[in-house]
Amino acid sequence: MNSFKPHSSHWGAFSGRYEDGRLEIRPHPGDPSPSPLLGNIAAIADSPARIRRPAIRRGWLEGTPGNALKRGIDDYVEVSWPEALAHVSEELRRVYGSFGPGSVFGGSYGWSSAGRFHHAQSQIHRFLNVLGGYVRSVNTYSSGAASVIIPHVLGPYDTFDRKSVTWDAIERSTELVLAFGGMAIKNADVHGGGISRHVVRQKLGGAKARGARFVSISPLKDDFSEELNANWLPIIPGTDVALMLGLAHVLVSGELHDRAFLDGYTVGYPRFEDYLLGRDDGQAKSPEWAAGICGIDVDVIREVARTMARSRTLITVSHSLQRADYGEQPVWMGIVLAAMLGQMGLDGGGYSYSLGALGNIGKSQLAVPLPTLNQFNNPVTDYIPVARVADMLLNPGAGFQYNGKNLHYPNIRLVYWAGGNPFHHHQDLNRLRAAFRQPETIIVHETAWTSTARHADIVLPATTTLERNDIGAADRDDLMIAMKKLIEPVGEARDDYDIFAGIARHLGKFDVFTENRTSEEWLVHLFETTRQALAAGGHQAPAFETFWAQGEVRLPLRPDEGGPAHAFRQDSDASPLQTPSGKIEIFSQSIAEFGYDDCQGHPRWYPARAQADHSYPIHLICNQPRQRLHSQLDYGDFSRSNKIESREPVRINPKDAQVRGIADGDIVRLFNNRGSCLAGAVLSEDVRVGVMQLATGAWFEPHNSTAEHAMCIHGNPNILTRDIGTSKLAQGCTGQITKVEVERFAGELSPVRIFDGMTFVQAAIKS
């Protein structure tokens, strides 16, 4: 009988064994609350959705004129690995030689898989840099607005705002958590690179037992755990800034704000107060004004503000709020609200961005570095904000504004994607389909036949973590895991590293890319960085062979001393913020000088652009799923068990369902002027009236692939979302909220076949 071997994933550490054609998974014994997402892993071994051989799109292979227009609807031809590598190498040589590295876009946006070496983004960026560089993307779909606004206001992203408040501090000291956008425990099931202990539920429970209270501000009741008995404020989507301003007005009018803190630790507050009280525009941002916008009763606004002022209060702002029109504003205004309370740097008080969005945020920092693959330097200076990929492909040469710069979209001839699924995370998928028909060549490494693979010209089958050895480790997690191979590669799948090494050999770059190391030799080499740091710190520092035999090693943590916020509060001269003033920038002169009309010098209320679309009366919340990580392993057992007649479930308030004749379990059609999708109706009082919720991540399957506005029969909400930036400052993703109508579907129900794999044809060789 095979023994269980240690392994890791973004949603938890585990061990597994493969025996008699069955993959068995066990959570790590030290995890107090293992994620149910582990239930998706077993399907990796034998799913028909897996890509088993290299394949090339027929039109591209035959060189048919205008063949790019058939991406997404064309047939595929299976080829041997030598043929595939030869085609890829020839095309890279042509494009780099004729047009230069500025004509190549290195996609690879996405979580890919856990593991410090076999990390697809690191591998592809290293490879393309060896060839001369590539056009890159910056920021993320999750935090595109926050990652730009926070450096202006607090300093480098992920420094002050996410390293100053820990779960331990909340458990021992916080009296009130005011969670804008809620704090859904399901999101803390995952963390990039791995998570060995899920502690959020335990820590929040400890705070509640001590007497802490929670206020969840979200159109979804279950954006906070039921057992915490949070006070649910069912806000109208996209109006959080108006509520924040109303709360701030109560603080000022009642003289409940901390003027000493504002004077000593911030800049620009008087200019903001002029706006808040209506001195500069004639409109006081009173609780009455806010109530008329956000749908929260004026007396509730007043009481929440007063409770904030008399409690040790932690203000959190979720990722979801800044994935919308003017997404910079709630992040910035949340910081201002916390500064007005004067609790920045106090134990369990102040501000934390996206706390609960990732499982390890809120844990203590590691005291040693993690193994990291050198990606080399990229000499290409062109880049795009990540959510502007369709704009780039559709508008080569066009100008755009970003963070004070006037930039231009490059002319991309070749797209190389590994470790991501843009047909999951990008918005307005019909527009993305059109954008993907523009480049001359698209090359994709994939484990399964996702829609991204189905829009590629050359598809190379990649292994999953289960099919290779690696080192599992993540920031703020104190367990490094020997990720041991559990199954043989499915079909002819190869590791990304071996694929790139094979192409590099064709192009004369093998020695540079590989440094003449095998994958196993790379693991030993990368582990040494951490081992040396452990030894230097006087900690247990096993040799790689010992670590591999033991299966894991414990890493030391830094003490919880309040982080940068505490140091800043203790002595702002000795520990200034990395902002122009060294203080919290309530008013930013830098942003004001950019001259943007959609993001000015201090936070303010901008009515959402989507609100003006009265043709579609329902707000659709497109949030993270509870049954998978993004679109990963949508074919897994746990993900599929939540579907209704193979469609993604959509939650509807019973009042909205009743007027439309929709019953629980009905297949419904959601639609607007960008497209439509089918989903299975779930009637729920946990959704605000006038709001529906449809999680992202269902693999995109268009009903009529040739139609300009195809319908997704599986339930991907990004067929409905808008592909526009948050503002000129950040150009972030706005995919969290859109406006739709819904009706009971009465047509012939097409079967969902996206998990059935691919059928293949024969073709002539490209001349």
Image (cartoon, rainbow, N blue to C red):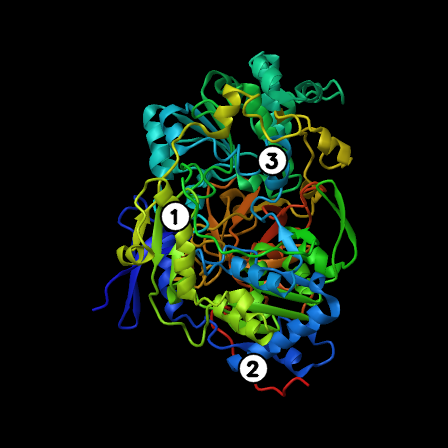
Q: Amino acid at mark 3?
A: Ile
Quarter of the figure with the C terminus: bottom right
In the rendering, which numbered label is found on residue 532?
1
Place of residue 330 in the rendered image (x, y in percent of width and height, measured from the top left) = 60, 34
Tell me the SS state at disc 1. Answer: helix
User: Compared to 746, does 573 lie above or below?
Assistant: above
Left of 665 or right of it: where is 412?
right
Q: Amino acid at mark 2?
A: Glu
Q: Which residue is mark 2?
A: 83
> Residue, x 72% and y 32% (percent of image)?
590
Image marks 3 and 1: residues in contact by CB distance under 8 Å: no
Q: CA distance from mark 3 to mark 2?
A: 48 Å
Image marks 3 and 2: residues in contact by CB distance under 8 Å: no
> N-terminal of the two: label 1 or label 2?
2
**Residue 687 appears in the picture as rendered:** yes
Outermost residue, left side: 1
Tell me the SS state at disc 2. Answer: helix
Q: Please state which of residues 295 and 352 is positioned toward the viewer in this rendering.
A: 352
Place of residue 66 in the rendered image (x, y in percent of width and height, measured from the top left) = 73, 76
> N-terminal of the two: label 3 or label 2?
2
Q: Which residue is mark 3?
A: 150
Place of residue 588 in the rendered image (x, y in percent of width and height, measured from the top left) = 69, 29
Q: Would you identify the image quadrant in which residue 392 lies?
A: bottom right
Quarter of the figure with the N terminus: bottom left
> N-terminal of the two: label 3 or label 1?
3
Q: Please state which of residues 132 and 435 is positioned toward the viewer in this rendering.
A: 132
**Callout 1: 10 Å neighbours few (<14), some, many (20+)?**
some
In the rendering, which numbered label is found on residue 656?
none
Q: CA distance from mark 1 to mark 2?
A: 43 Å
Tell me the SS state at disc 3. Answer: helix
Q: Would you identify the image quadrant in which residue 524 lies?
A: bottom left
Q: Please state which of residues 162 and 739 is positioned toward the viewer in this rendering.
A: 162
